[in-house]
Image (cartoon, rainbow, N blue to C red):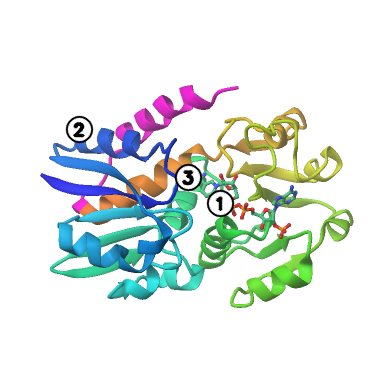
């Protein structure tokens, strides 16, 4: 039996076992996916422990996505640029780190048929999740990428390796017609379901609204966007996609679209509002 799991601090409501167990089943993989809740005092021994115990692959979540990086033998280019690893693969005694949120975001856009090349993207919120989003947009030749933050100069310092522009919310008020607006803030997430980072006045200047929040599936941001005729994309397939990419790395498989859609549908039932 192959051992896999999720490393983090508080893992109570993780959906990762649902995603990985379904992929194991559909691909005849004899795998076990554990939740490993790790106390902060052990954070510098995470990779050593995986190697010791013979764990083949792990996802990593808050607050250990950065601290594991210095313990790895190899870090992929996207994870280096993002500055966070959320997937570890142990092979022949060496530990390899990746950022599959980056791929999950890409799979979500592909599924929704949202083209990146040559288009303008405005991303709300200068947090950890925005890093994977911005890197994917950069790598896929978006024409313009603007990171919108409540504190523009702080955001510019935090994201100085990125080839992007910065705005605060007052400046966002001045824009005219643009392509896509992406919510990468926690606004609208359960239980604060009546909040949104931007008003209808702003949302209606875009053609596409993407929310990486998935609980609820249709956030207030997406509801307002839909009622103004925008194409809307919810964040659940990004979650599915990051798990799928991790499995593809760990088990050298291609997860077919039927399995991916079945995972999405079964998780969707948990979050429909
Ligand atoms: P975070 O660090 O808590 O917040 C991201 C940024 O949002 C903050 O740095 C802040 O940026 C802005 N923000 C926070 N509170 C705000 C408020 N009340 N009003 C306006 N802006 C606010 O979160 P994160 O880890 O980056 O994740 C963001 C969201 O993405 C979460 O809801 C998370 O669940 C979701 N997510 C989804 C997936 C997926 O697979 N679909 C993956 C990762 C994360 P400024 O200070 O610069 O304004």
Q: Nearer the viewer, mark 1 or mark 3?
A: 3
Point out residue 246 in the picture as x, y percentages from the top left corner: 32, 52
In this figure, what is the number of numbered marks? Answer: 3
Question: Where 102 sits versus 83, above or below?
Answer: above
In the image, what residue occupies the spot 35% across and 58% down? 87
Considering the whole magenta stretch, tell me its main secondary structure.
Answer: helix
The answer to if 5 sits in the magenta stretch is no
Q: Secondary structure at mark 3?
A: helix
- Residue that label 3 marks: 238
In the image, what residue occupies the spot 19% across and 51% down? 251
- Residue that label 1 marks: 115
- Asked whether the beta carbons under mark 1 and mark 2 sit within 8 Å of each other, the answer is no
| Ligand 1 within 8 Å, label 2 CB | no
Residue 138 sits in which quadrant?
Answer: bottom right
Front residue of 65/91: it is 65
- Residue that label 2 marks: 25
In the image, what residue occupies the spot 40% across and 58% down? 86
Question: Split into 4 quadrants, where in the image is the C terminus?
Answer: top right
Task: For label 2, count other residues whose C-alpha is less than 10 Å away and answer few (under 14), some (14-19) or many (20+).
Answer: few
In the image, what residue occupies the spot 44% across and 48% down? 107
Q: Quote the CA–CA distance across marks 1 and 3.
A: 16 Å
Task: Check the image and name the residue furthest to the front.
Answer: 41
Task: For label 1, count other residues whose C-alpha is less than 10 Å away and answer few (under 14), some (14-19) or many (20+).
Answer: few
């Amino acid at each position: 039996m192959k051992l896999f799991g999720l490393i983090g601090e508080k893992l109570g409501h993780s959906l990762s076992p649902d995603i990985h167990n379904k992929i194991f089943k559909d691909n005849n993989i004899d795998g076990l996916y554990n939740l490993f809740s790790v106390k902060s005092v052990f954070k510098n021994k995470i990779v050593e422990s995986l190697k010791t115990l013979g764990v083949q692959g792990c996802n990593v979540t808050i607050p250990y996505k950065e601290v594991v990086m210095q313990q790895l033998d190899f870090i992929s280019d996207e994870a280096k640029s993002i500055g966070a690893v959320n997937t570890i693969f142990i092979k022949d005694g060496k530990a390899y780190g990746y950022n599959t949120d980056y791929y999950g975001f890409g799979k979500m856009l592909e599924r929704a048929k949202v083209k990146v090349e040559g288009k303008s993207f405005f991303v709300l919120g200068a947090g950890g999740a925005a890093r994977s989003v911005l890197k994917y947009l950069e790598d896929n030749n978006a024409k313009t990428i603007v990171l919108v933050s409540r504190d523009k100069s702080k955001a510019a310092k935090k994201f100085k390796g990125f080839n992007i522009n910065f705005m605060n919310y007052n400046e966002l008020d001045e824009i005219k017609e643009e392509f896509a607006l992406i919510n990468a803030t926690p606004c609208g997430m359960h239980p604060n379901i009546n909040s949104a980072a931007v008003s209808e006045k702003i949302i209606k200047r875009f053609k596409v609204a993407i929310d990486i929040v998935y609980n609820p599936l249709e956030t207030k941001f997406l509801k307002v966007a839909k009622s103004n005729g925008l194409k809307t994309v919810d964040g659940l397939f990004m979650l599915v996609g990051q798990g799928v990419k991790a499995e593809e790395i760990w088990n050298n498989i291609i997860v077919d679209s039927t399995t991916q859609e079945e995972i999405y549908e079964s998780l969707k039932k948990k979050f429909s509002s």
